Image (tube, rainbow, N blue to C red):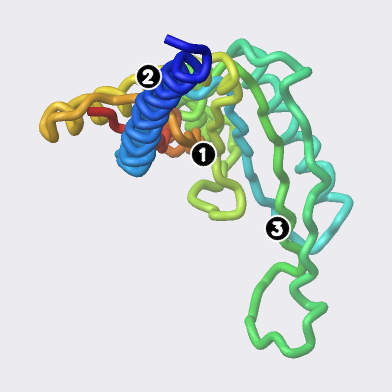
């Protein structure tokens, strides 16, 4: 075989090999495009119940009268007795704050037609802010003991609600996100199994927002924490 024929023979082999490789690449590319268009979107939920670790308890009392100095002395006396009640029951002074009294002059409003025997209505608020949630809950139940001292505690005022909080979210975030992601993957695996596919890599993922709510209106010191992860997976043959 002379050189020209050998050259043509080898050239034909190389062209054939090139066409085979090109065909395989095209096939792989088409398969990849097909698979990249097949996805499944799933959500993974994680919920937990935790006890509140911070409570803000406003203790509200009122004084009425016509003489401000007398009312002031009554407020001071009330504050002393409430402070003593709190300290005797395990609340530290650093956890207690006293707001300035709110004084309303009932005769200052010339458009008021209410016939009130007293001129002044004074609202006195002492606030307990503590991590001793269980202890404060006990004292809320025991605050009727102050009635024996002649102190009437005002209850049910929407302006002065007891507030329970959970402030340690960062410590449980990683575990909750991991659980939500796991639940999302299980949902994706189930879908893929039913459709004769298998789950591939993640296309996009969204952690979602954490929410903290009261478990119910009767136990505001128990919080329900919730997070939803949204994940889109590729599906493969």
Decide: is 47 above or below 111: above
Label 1, label 3: how far apart the Cα atoms are: 48 Å
- The residue under label 3 is 64
Quadrant of the image containing the C terminus = top left
Q: Residues within 10 Å of mark 3 (few under 14, many from 20)?
A: some
Q: Name the residue at 25% across, 23% down.
A: 186
Q: Position of residue 235 (x, y in %)?
A: 29, 32
Q: Residue furthest front?
A: 2
Query: Sequence-wise, which precedes: disc 2 or disc 3?
Result: 3
Q: Position of residue 140 (x, y in %)?
A: 49, 29
Label 2, label 3: how far apart the Cα atoms are: 57 Å
Depth check: 42 or 10 in front?
Answer: 10
Image-quadrant location for residue 51: top left
Q: Name the residue at 48% across, 12% down.
A: 2
Q: Name the residue at 83% across, 50% down.
A: 70
In this rendering, would 218 be left or right of 203?
Answer: left
- The residue under label 2 is 179
The label on residue 45 is none
The label on residue 209 is 1
Query: Sequence-wise, which precedes: disc 1 or disc 3?
Result: 3
Depth check: 60 or 215 in front?
Answer: 215
- Answer yes or no: do the residues labelled 1 and 3 have beta carbons within 8 Å? no
């Amino acid at each position: 075989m002379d050189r020209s024929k050998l050259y043509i023979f080898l050239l034909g082999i190389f062209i054939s090999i090139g066409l085979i490789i090109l065909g395989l690449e095209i096939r792989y590319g088409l398969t990849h495009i097909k698979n990249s268009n097949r996805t499944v979107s799933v959500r993974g939920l994680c919920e937990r119940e935790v006890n509140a670790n911070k409570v803000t308890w406003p203790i509200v009392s009122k004084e009425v009268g016509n003489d401000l100095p007398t009312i002031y002395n009554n407020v001071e006396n009330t504050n002393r007795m409430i402070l003593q009640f709190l300290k005797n029951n395990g609340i530290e002074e650093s956890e207690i704050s006293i707001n300035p009294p709110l004084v309303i002059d009932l005769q200052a409003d010339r458009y008021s037609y209410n016939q009130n025997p007293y001129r002044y209505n004074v609202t006195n608020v002492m606030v307990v802010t503590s991590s001793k949630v269980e202890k404060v809950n006990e004292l809320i139940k025991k605050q009727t003991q102050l009635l024996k001292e002649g102190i009437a505690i005002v209850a049910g005022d929407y302006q002065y609600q007891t507030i329970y909080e959970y402030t340690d979210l960062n410590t449980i975030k990683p575990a909750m996100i991991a659980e939500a992601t796991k639940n999302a993957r299980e949902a994706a695996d189930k879908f893929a199994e039913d459709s004769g596919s298998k789950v591939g890599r993640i296309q996009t993922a969204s952690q979602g927002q954490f929410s903290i709510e009261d478990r119910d209106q009767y136990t505001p010191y128990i919080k329900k924490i919730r997070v939803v992860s949204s994940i889109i997976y590729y599906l493969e043959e």
